[in-house]
Amino acid sequence: MQQLQPYKKSLIFALDTPDLIQAKLWATKFKNYVWGYKLGLEFFTANGPDGVKHIQELGKPIFLDLKLHDIPNTVGKTIANINKLGVEMTTLHITGSSDMLKAAVDNNDKTLLLGVSVLTSMDSNNLEQIGIQLMPLLYVEHLSKIALKSGIGGVVCSPKEVGPLKQQFGKKLKYITPGVRFTDNSTGDQKRVSTPEQAILSGSDYLVMGRGLLEKYSPI
């Protein structure tokens, strides 16, 4: 796993499993090669806040990826609760509107709020199905402007959009990129992907990898 050393300060390992024991085994295996761990809906709905605490015991930052999307009042109160967990980052769908994002910001204390733009499993055909007549890059740029104006600290996008976003917004936002795969990985359900090297060169601040790491290194 020495190949991961260049990415150690930016690599977030996605613990995408409902099995707490399995998650801790994976997390321990990669502990010395990653910046932190991502816990998503699959993990959180199975293990809740107690599960988050168990992973925090490993001493790494936590990216709680819940992709909130609800009325402003509900999201604001949820962010206040998330702050009590002591996680480093959490996510909200930018499409929830600037009102929702601002409610999150107003109720936030110390968590880095990340706006989800276009999921890396989506392409222009998927956007057209829901009435969006823009190519992914243009839509991501549009949503990122909303996030920035609303006080959100970063955006989640594919590595393919990071370069143009960084040209527009510079360091005003943090750029978190899932959809990262090694050249010999399968892409699975991801459609807008890049290698870790390409993502870093494009300007990604954090790379999110789960299946790609497990597939390559078969840790368990």
Image (tube, helix red, strand yellow):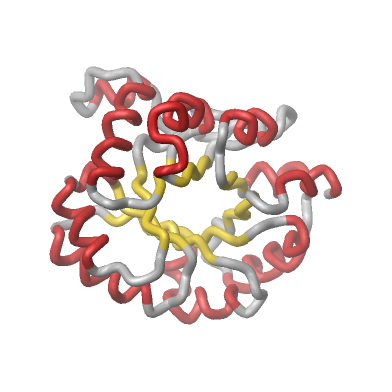
Q: How many dots with numbers?
A: 0
Front residue of 8 and 174? 174
> Residue drawn 61% across and 49% down?
210
Image quadrant in which you'd find residue 120: top left
Front residue of 208 and 102? 102
**Location of residue 121 in the rendering, given as x and y in whole percent from the top left corner:** 44, 34
* Residue 141 higher or lower than 79, as above or below: above
Image quadrant in which you'd find residue 144: top left
**Location of residue 109 in the rendering, given as x and y in whole percent from the top left corner:** 34, 71
Horizontally, is 47 left or right of 98 in the view?
Answer: right
Would residue 42 be visible to someone looking at this image? no
* Residue 152 higher or lower than 175, as above or below: below
Horizontally, is 192 left or right of 24 in the view?
Answer: left
> Residue drawn 78% across and 50% down?
218
> Residue drawn 46% across and 46% down?
174
Front residue of 207 and 108? 108
Would residue 162 be visible to someone looking at this image? yes
